[in-house]
Image (cartoon, coloured by chain):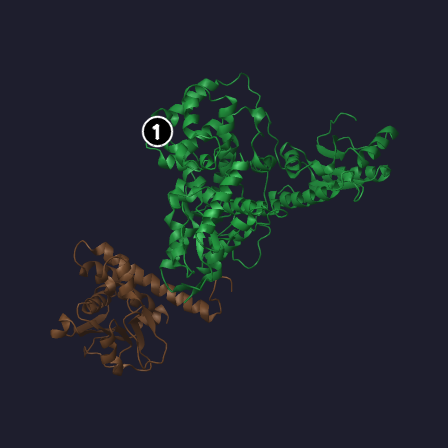
Chain colours: A brown, B green
Amino acid sequence: MTKAAAITTKKEILVTGFGGQGVVLIGSILGQAAALGDHRESTQVQSYGPESRGGYCCSQIIIDDRQIQYPYVRRPDILVCMSQTGYDKYAYMLLDTTLLITDQDLVKPIGFDRDYLSIPATRLAEEMGRKMIANIVMLGFFSSVTLAVSRKSVEEAVKDSVPKGTEEMNLNAFKKGWDYGAAMLKGREKKAAGHAGVAS
Amino acid sequence: MKKNTAAMKLIVFICNWGPHTAMHTLQEQGADIPNEIGLIRVPCAGRINRALLLRAFEMGADGVALLGCSAGACRYGSGTETAVGNIDDMQEILDLLGIGRQRLRLGMSLPDEAPQLLQFLKTFSDDIRALGKSPVEPQAMKAVQAQAPDTAALVRAIIAGRDVFACQDCGKCTSACPLALTGKNYSPRAIANAVITGGATSETVQKDVRACLTCGLCHERCPSDVNFPEFIRDLRGLERPDSETRSEAHEGFFQSLMRTMASPGLTTRKWQWLGNDVAIDPASKTLFWGGCAAYFDYFFRNFLAVKTRDILVDSLKLLNFFDIKPAVLEDERCCGHDLLWAGDEKNFLRLARLNAQAIKEHGIEEIICACPECYRTFVHDYPAHGIELACKVTHLYDILEREIDKGAVGFKKLEHAVTFQDPCRLSRLEGKADLPRKLISRLKTQGFKEMQDFGAAALCCGNCAWTGCDAYSKKLQVLRLKQARATGSDLLITSCPKCQIHLTCAMEDPIQSGDIKIEMIDLTGVLVKTLRWE
């Protein structure tokens, strides 16, 4: 996907996970980055109710260059799953063109036979010392592999959205996810070209 | 022989037997021997080792010929064969050095081959004349000073500079010293005491100063923070010039090599052997600094057969793997580490200035080092001696750790249990013992086990700065290898070409090799074998 194409097309994004993982925050950061940073239209709706205290939870984001008439996701371009129930519940919405992104350790996309992208976001966050920032790691990964929003805008939105005093930690988490995504794309490219190892 | 008045300086080492008889015939005939040839008569061509051949170039020879007896005619049996081997090695090394193999040649003659000998000498002389002067600027070998330096004042300055009076006489240094551990009658504390009480120039202290490994374990343990390795380094600088070769290992070959590289006119060909399997970008502002591994491989090829050059190729491959295409300095010189630690600060500074200038001219913004000695010298000793590089210096491992940490790469299984030999310059002197360990912990090995002494407390590989190698160095190496074997590992990972060389040397022991032999590989080699995109 070229950067130009990414920025001029409509994107319907569904982010699912456990309540408390911060999937709603991912949605609101993305929406804010697209609207305030990239000067595009965006909407975000979130599940609100008992599920936000555990159980599955979801956030629906639409980014477009034209005015958005309907804020719910009907044909997802990207489905991000941070928990197994999040996948199980929304798998029915997957289209042939939907890009699936998962937390590697938490989600097994049963019955999904296409290529998809995954990152051990929760593990990486734990390694960085705070499990809480798994959502920002995922956000970084999402941003680098989809280019749905510009890096600068998301980083600004992250800074504005997280609690005061944790900006640096969250930006590091974002970078971690971004680098992981960039490295993964590079690795896939290299493997496709037949250069998997150092020597070959 | 007519006195040499020509500008060219040609040195001919001539064997006392076959060639000298032929030469004698020529001289009696009043033959037209080229004027610029200086003859040095030696008992056997095989006794002119590589250090002596190089020394001639270091001292300003434009061409050197070694004349021995024809194959099979050597009075001592193996002289001719040895001479051929030495010349082969030296020609490769002279090519790398940028002096060129054509300036060194081997001639063989029988006593009755006077005309052929004359022809050889004429061709030799013509060829060198066509090549012109050697790019090496000879240095005054013995510093001729107007008056004797005030040694006592220098010693006082060293004692004050390294704060040796802070020594509490506790002896922790001696109990930590690896040399003392091998049973050598050796005590850093006693050296400090002797120097303070005016014994700096005594024979025993001088000898002890030369024997120090400068491994830094004593400084690590010292409660008063007396920097003993640098104290030793200062004292080495005091040594009388006429005793210069006393304790140099390999007949002083490496010191001579480094001093030769300090000639400003010299353009080395350090990377001429590099193959097409690695990508280099001459325009890059990131420089990969190789170090002297290529020289080591030629020098040790017939004895230890170490392959330290592979470390450079592997490092470049790893950088390429992460899409980093660095530049290399085609005319890279030695960083000067070994000269500095051998006490030759003057030539160290000459090298350092030339390096700093070359790095600046290429507009380099970051230097990547794979060699712990080069790394330490650039980040620490250059600034300490007033040489500013004005660019970032990074160890290769830092880059690899950064890139691997980004994720999406994995490691193939390594069917070995491994242990690790710490390089003193990285682990102790620069305090980065955890850096190689981070990389090792990522490997999928059959288990990683530390040796009894590890990290900042690790034992030395047995030698530093090519000086003071003796039976105790060997003992230390054997001890270290036994520690490695005691871990139950079957692969010893190293991070410095010198560790490879020195530990391989100990393993050559025919009697003990059964107890100490262990497969060795540089960390870069392991990574190249196992690292891959997931």
Residue name at image x 82 percent, y 38 percent = B117
The amino acid pointed to by label 1 is: Cys
Q: Nearer the viewer, residue A136 or B240?
A: B240
Q: Is residue B394 shown to the viewer in this render?
A: yes
Q: Is residue B466 shown to the viewer in this render?
A: no
Q: Relative to A80, is B198 above or below?
A: above
Identify the subunit bearing mark 1. Answer: B
Q: Residue farthest to the top? A: B147
Residue B469 image offset from top left, x and y in percent: 54, 36
In-image side of B359 versus A13 (left or right): right
Picture quadrant where residue A73 is located = bottom left
Q: Relative to B133, is A96 above or below?
A: below
In-image side of A19 versus A4 (left or right): left
Picture quarter with the C terminus of chain B: bottom left
Q: Nearer the viewer, residue A119 or B492?
A: B492
In-image side of B154 versus B252 (left or right): left
Picture quarter with the N terminus of chain B: top right
Q: Secondary structure at mark 1?
A: loop
Q: Nearer the viewer, residue B520 or A129?
A: B520
Q: Residues within 10 Å of mark 1 (few under 14, many from 20)?
A: few
Residue A177 image offset from top left, x and y in percent: 30, 63
Residue B62 image offset from top left, x and y in percent: 68, 35
In-image side of B380 versus A33 (left or right): right
- The residue under label 1 is B170
Total marks shown come to 1
